[in-house]
Image (spheres, rainbow, N blue to C red):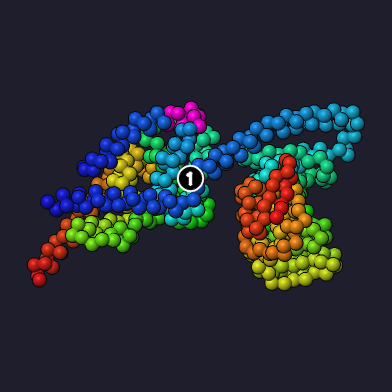
Amino acid sequence: MIFEEIHEAASHLVQKVSADDARLALGVPGSFVSVEREVALRRYAAAHRWIVALSGGCAVFAALLLFLIVSRPERVVLPSDSITFVPVPGYLQEVSLTVDADGSLHIPSGEVTVSKVVEETIPAGWTSVQAPRGILAHVSLPDGSSVALNSNSILSFPKEFPEDSRNVTLSGEAFFEVSKDADRPFTVNTENIAVHVYGTSFGVCTGDEAEVYLLEGSVAVESGSLSAELRPGEKAVLSGGSLSVSQAKVEESVYWKDRVLRLDNSTITEVVNKIEQHYGVSIQIAGTAMGSGKVINGKLVLRDSVEAVLDNVCSTFGLEWDKTAGNYYIIID
Amino acid sequence: MRNFAIIDNKMQQNGIKDTQLWDDFRKGNAASFEKVYTMCAPALSAYGMRLCGDAELVGDTVQDLFVKLITKHSSLGATDNICAYLMVSFRNLLCDKLRKHGGVPLDEAQFAIPDESALFDEVTEQTEKEKRLWRTVSSLSGRQREIIYLYYVKGYSHQQIADIMGINYQSSKNLLHRTIEGIRKAFFILFLSTVYVLIRL
């Protein structure tokens, strides 16, 4: 009789747990619409790949012809390993790239389209990877280091690292997680600064002002005769010929790595500039909307389409947006 | 052994419908994609929440699973219980993600069940018995709670449970048998001690 009691109680409990399941499921984000969108995005990328592969094939053929006609083999470096990613319009896409020990490049199939870089002048034996606007690339180097390359940035490195050094060059912004190797110091060279690393994670941003921020380990920053050593939590800024080191919220500096923008008293113009940079779109602000003087703080997630991000931003500022053509948008009052 | 007739009936009815729906899905029928999502996403989400409790991670895993299923629909195998079939890949995917995030591996995870206070808001004589049973279930190991959940709440067969939990058929039977024995003993002891206390009074 006691076991019958158990069974009765148990069947009640089963029903209660089922009801609790429904409650739990409600707390989990996600919808079929977002699944559909992701599937469409992948199909688009796959279809796009064919077109690029075809035109790429034609380009290679043309280049070969040209190569044969004006044959000066000792000077021509075929940029066969230097690539740029082709973004999907309206999205900030995250892609990954692996560099093998023999210098060959790999990307997961079906994720992104790649085309060759022709305009870059790359030293012989070097590879260059370009993340244009609309792409955030995670690059794994053969020594075990990894680099998150922000959109509109270029990273170059030798096809094989020599035994005594690991030199890379950067233009734009990147976050490095360098694997420890005491015999082979890692150096990031940019137009105006060099960062010497001893196994650590840090970010470098070049431009009018070069900036280096350190999360872990230690790095030395060098620019001409100036030099500085950074401790975790510090950032170095090269501006107007002087190099200054200060405490900074370095964790916030790398939000971009996860496709998140940190907004700190940002005006609509500043926000729009960043969206333009990350999505590779052009956004115009109509005269009256600009002067509102309102600023916003917080995080802006860039994992959705540019339309969704604009919705978000405009509702915060109390503005409206419209699509004018292709990649052109306008913000109005 | 399983006395919950409601569940068994529901399962059999679903079986016929599931086979057809799943065949449509494998042929790439767009309407069936949404139907399967609506049918199974809540169950997968709830199961995932019990396994790891991270709503965002569970949501991502459900989304990734369906994106993968839809893009590779033609290479999927046959099944007569879609949700049970999906739970196998779902659990593996969640396992991988947890490992990548450096979280607690699933095997050591505590399978979460609702709090006693959340389940029993009204106090009746009936709930006293349920509470007693609930306490014994709460004292089980994570894997024991998981098998109880899959067998009784979800109504899955031993073969399905073996696939989901990554164990073999016999281990599934043994694990459930041991668990039930444990519950019976614990329940019986609780019962005896209550009687004993009553007599002493």
Residue at the (65%, 58%) spot, across then down: A318
Q: Is residue A102 visible?
A: no
Q: Tell me how many marks there are.
A: 1
Can see residue B89?
A: yes
Q: Is residue A312 left or right of residue B192?
A: right
- Queried whether the magenta region covers residue B25, the answer comes back as yes
Query: Where does residue A36 sit, x and y in percent of width and height?
Result: 54, 39
Q: Which residue is mark 1?
A: B62
Residue drawn at x 51%, y 56% as measured from the top left: B102
Please tell me which residue lies in front, A267 or B88: A267
Residue drawn where x is 47% and y is 48% of the image: B94
Which residues lie in the magenta part?
A: B22-30
Q: Chain of mark 1?
A: B
Determine the residue positioned at 52% across, 38% down.
B68
Residue A128 sits inside the magenta stretch: no
| Tag 1 secondary structure | helix
Image coords of residue A276 (percent x, y): 73, 51
What secondary structure do most residues of the magenta stretch adopt? helix
Callout 1 amino acid: Val
Q: Is residue A97 left or right of residue B93?
A: right
Q: Where residue A287 sits: x, y (%)?
A: 77, 56
Q: Quadrant of the C terminus of chain A?
A: bottom right
